[in-house]
Structure formats: C-alpha cells, structure tokens
Image (cartoon, helix red, strand yellow):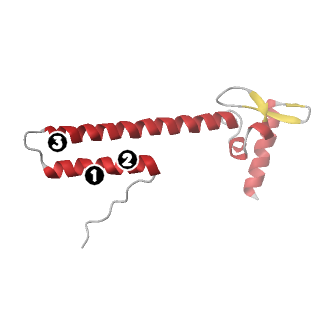
Amino acid sequence: KASAAKAAAATTATSLSSGSEGGKTKTICASCKQSLPSLSSFNKNQLSKGEGKARCRSCVEKSIADEAKASSNSKQEQINDAKERLRVAKGREKPDPKEILAAESQIAALEAEHVTGLKPVKLGRGR
C-alpha cells in the first residue's frame, strides 16, 4: 500500500510540475532533457524518483549497454595483463614453476569469469 501511494504521489507531482497535454502527463528525462509521456516512456521505478532524477527507458537501456561494454573492456585488459605477467615469468632465465602456475591459474579464472559472468569461488585453507 505504501509503495502504491508513493507511486501515485510521484505521478501527481510530475503531472503538476511538468503539466499535461490532452490528459497525458509528461515528465522531463534527467539524461536527455526531453519532455516525454510518463506512462509510455518511463517505468514505475524511474517515475518514483521524481522530477529531475527520472530517466526515460531509452536512456536507461543506453546506460546499461555502456556499463556492460566498459566492464567487458576492463575484463579484457585484466586478461591481457595476466597473459603479459605469464610471458614475463616464462621468459626468465630460471622460470619459477610456482609463479608460472599462479599466473596460469589467474588467467584461467579471469577467462572463465569473462565467459560465464561468474566469479571464482575461493575456498578456505582446509583442515
């Protein structure tokens, strides 16, 4: 009941502050600054944020896509750095097997996380 009242209050506030045309309330998107129909261009979560903070569906979708792209680029950079560390470890005059194994394990974990989206589970020390 409280969330329904909050959503109704937000809708009322947007219709009062942004006006209405032909019975349709309009809300201004915080990202693209366009005045768009509230019910078709905004979801309930964004409308409940109120005027000046609500983003339209297309801006939210674009933001999510940009975050995913940045995350993917970051993961690829981490994988490339780990591969470089492995190359350096193998290129030494006396390669340390522990260091090589640790570097290969890190590459495997990063690549698995990149492919599946799941972070590796770190187990305890055992008994």
Q: Amino acid at mark 3?
A: Lys
The image shows residue 98 at horizontal and vertical percentages of 16, 52
Q: Quadrant of residue 29?
A: top right
**In this image, 37 relative to 82: left or right?**
right
Q: Amino acid at mark 1?
A: Ser
- Mark 1 in CB contact with mark 3 (< 8 angstroms): no
Residue holding disc 3: 90
- Mark 2 in CB contact with mark 3 (< 8 angstroms): no
Q: Is residue 50 visible?
A: yes
Instruction: State the residue in front, 10 or 92.
Output: 92
Residue at point 37%, 47% (across, down): 111
The image shows residue 114 at horizontal and vertical percentages of 42, 46
The outermost residue toward the bottom is 127
Q: Earlier in the sequence, mark 1 or mark 3?
A: 3
Q: Is residue 55 visible?
A: no
Q: Amino acid at mark 2?
A: Glu
The image shows residue 15 at horizontal and vertical percentages of 82, 36
Instruction: State the residue in front, 46 or 91.
Output: 91
Element under disc 1: helix
Residue holding disc 1: 105
- Mark 2 in CB contact with mark 1 (< 8 angstroms): no
As drawn, 77 above or below 113: above
Q: Earlier in the sequence, mark 2 or mark 1?
A: 1
Q: Quadrant of residue 26?
A: top right
Q: Residues within 10 Å of mark 2 (few under 14, many from 20)?
A: some
How many tags in the picture?
A: 3
Looking at the rendered image, the quarter that the N terminus falls into is: bottom right
The image shows residue 41 at horizontal and vertical percentages of 75, 37
